[in-house]
Structures are given as C-alpha cells and as structure tokens.
Amino acid sequence: MSVSYFVRYDIAVADLKGFLERYRKVHVPAVTSWPGLRRMVIHTPVDWKDPFPVNRGRAVLMAQLEFDSEEAMNRAFASPERAAAREDFKRFMTYEGTVTHQAMATEEVWRKGK
C-alpha cells in the first residue's frame, strides 16, 4: 500500500489559465525533484452532469503526490527540495480561497480488467 499526499486548491484567481500554466511549468518540476516521490498527478475540473443532487466541489486544481510509504513521504517533507517548493509556493500569483494539504493511505480496491 502506498501513501498519497493531496494539495487541493479551492481558490479564485484572476487568470486561472496563467495560474495553471505556471503551476505546470515551474511548480511541478520543483515538486518532482523531491526524493522518494514516485508519481505526481494533477487533477483539474471538467464540466459534468449528475442527475442526482450532490455537493459540487469548487477546487480548480488538486495535486496528488504518491510515495511508497509514510517514511518516504516524511523524508521528502524534510528535504531541501521540499523547502524550495514551499518557497516557490510563496511566489504564486495572488488568489483568494483555501489551499489544503492532506496525506492518506492509498489502496486500490478495484480496477476494470484490460
């Protein structure tokens, strides 16, 4: 079982396209230099329709960072590469809203056969 660290951006930003472009070009390389990081996935919203009433999220970006273990994740958090990524985070364009961080155990419970 692996560990995933999620960073969720529930934000409003004047230039979302520019924000996402900078995120991909500058912040992703900073994050992917972390020791022990095995995979990074970014999720962005799509237009979707659900015939049932649901509480729609407002995130404009969710980053998923995957590690082999909690220990590997915690070593990455203590690294100079993580410190550099946090410094880059301080240089993001101005936004309003909330950025949340959460680590969770990752367990694939089903996958359709190929």
Image: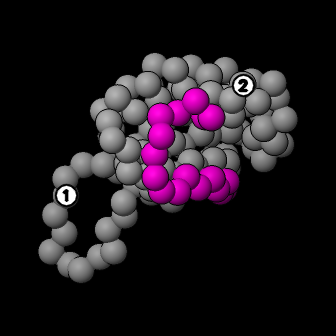
Magenta highlight range:
89-105
Q: Is residue 15 left or right of residue 107?
A: left
Task: Report the residue at 52% width, 20% height from top.
Answer: 26
Which label belongs to residue 91?
A: none
Where residue 96 appears, as percent x and y from the top left, is 46, 52
Task: Report the residue at 60% width, 34% height from top.
Answer: 89
Image quarter of residue 110: bottom left
Q: Which residue is mark 1?
A: 48
Residue count near mark 1 (Cα–Cα under 10 Å), binned few <14, some 14–19, many ≥20:
few
The amino acid marked with disc number 1 is: Trp
Where residue 5 appears, as percent x and y from the top left, is 63, 47
Task: Report the residue at 36% width, 60% height from top.
Answer: 58
* Vertical placement of residue 25 versus 59, above or below: above
Q: Nearer the viewer, residue 23 or 39?
A: 23
Image quarter of residue 100: bottom right
* Mark closer to the chain start, 2 or 1: 1
* Vertical placement of residue 44 versus 36, above or below: below
Where residue 45 appears, as percent x and y from the top left, is 30, 49
Asked if residue 56 can be seen in this view, the reply is yes
Q: Which residue is mark 2?
A: 84
Whole-Å distance between the Cαs marked 2 and 1? 36 Å
Element at label 2: helix
Q: Is residue 81 left or right of residue 98?
A: right
